[in-house]
Amino acid sequence: MITSMAPLLDDIRAALKASGQSRYAIAKATSISQAHLCQFVKGTKGLSVEAAEVLAEHLGLELVARPKRAKAKPRAQRGRKGR
């Protein structure tokens, strides 16, 4: 389960801006509407996983799924044995 796609979406936004391509050109190439791209870049609308994949491919990015990191134990529980 994806808990937050925010870092991924921020990376895609940055790549869109850095690409120098117009939203019209990106919309034509990806079949994602200009309106949706505009709202996404402004941060008022997100992207589906499918749309993120299409944009990533267009921008030369790679989406990678990796195992979740294990959470560290809280400090109070470290090193304690059955007290």
Image: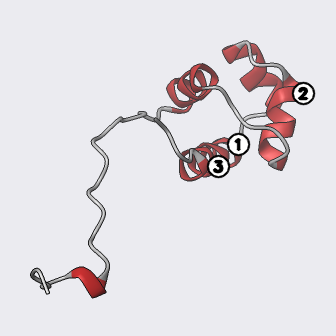
On the image, numbered disc 3 is attached to which residue? 18
Question: What's the CA distance linking mark 2 and mark 1?
Answer: 18 Å
Count of numbered circles in the view: 3
Q: Position of residue 77 (x, y in %)?
A: 24, 81
How many residues crowd around disc 2 within 10 Å: few (fewer than 14), some, or many (20 or more)?
A: few
Observer-nearest residue: 25 or 77? 77
The earlier-in-sequence mark between 2 and 1 is 1
| Residue for point 14% across, 85% down | 80
**Which label sits on residue 35?**
2
Q: Where on the picture, by quarter, is residue 78?
A: bottom left
Q: Where on the picture, by quarter, is residue 45?
A: top right
Please say if the residues under marks 3 and 1 sit with CB atoms less than 8 Å apart.
yes
Question: What's the CA distance linking mark 3 and mark 1?
Answer: 5 Å
Q: Identity of the amino acid at label 3?
A: Ala
- Local secondary structure at mark 2: helix
Q: Is residue 59 left or right of residue 38?
A: left
Farthest residue to the front: give it: 83
**Which label sits on residue 38?**
none
Question: What's the CA distance linking mark 2 and mark 3?
Answer: 19 Å
Q: Identity of the amino acid at label 1?
A: Gly
